[in-house]
Image (cartoon, helix red, strand yellow):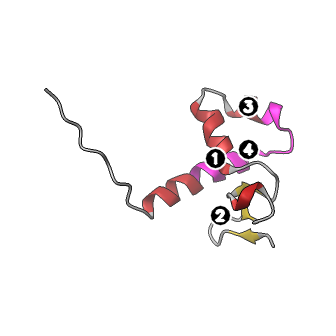
Amino acid sequence: MELRHYRFRRITMDPNKCMGKPCIRGLRIPVSSILNYLSSGMTIEEILQEWPELEREDIYEALGFAAFMLEEQMIPLEEVHTQ
C-alpha cells in the first residue's frame, strides 16, 4: 500500500518498495539516494540525465522533505573535546 506524505505530494512510502523508505513518486528511487547524489557533487542536470524518469520538482521536493524531517526531530550530538 503506497502512502503519500501529507505535505510533500511527490514523496511516497510503500513497505513493498525500498523497505518502506521515502521514495520519489512511487519510483524505486529513495529520497536518500537523491541527497547522496547531490552531496557527492552531482548537479541537478546530471541527476536528471542519469534518471530520465525524474523531474526537477522531484529533486526540490526531496530537499524540502529532508529539511522538514530534520526540523521534526532532535539529533543527539557528541561532545567534542579539544586539547
Viewer-proximal residue among 49 and 17: 17
Residue corresponding to mark 1: 32
Question: Around disc 2, counting alpha carbons within 10 Å, would you say few (fewer than 14), some (14 to 19), or many (20 or more)?
Answer: some
> In 3D space, how far apart are the residues under numbered discs 1 and 4 (Cα atoms)?
16 Å
Dot in front, 1 or 2: 1
| First in sequence: mark 1 vs mark 3 | 1
Q: Which residue occupies 67% across, 42% down?
A: 34
Residue corresponding to mark 2: 8
| First in sequence: mark 1 vs mark 2 | 2
Residue corresponding to mark 4: 56
Question: Around disc 1, counting alpha carbons within 10 Å, would you say few (fewer than 14), some (14 to 19), or many (20 or more)?
Answer: some
Quick check: is 60 in the magenta stretch?
yes
Which span is picked out in magenta?
48-64
SS at circle 3: helix
Decide: marks 2, 3 in contact (CB < 8 A)? no
Q: Which residue occupies 79% across, 58% down?
A: 17
Amino acid type at mark 2: Phe
Q: Where residue 51 sits in the image (x, y, percent)?
A: 82, 37
Task: Work out which residue is located at the far right of the displayed protein and give it.
Answer: 53
Residue corresponding to mark 3: 45
Dot in front, 1 or 3: 1
Amino acid type at mark 4: Arg
Q: Is residue 27 left or right of residue 7?
A: right
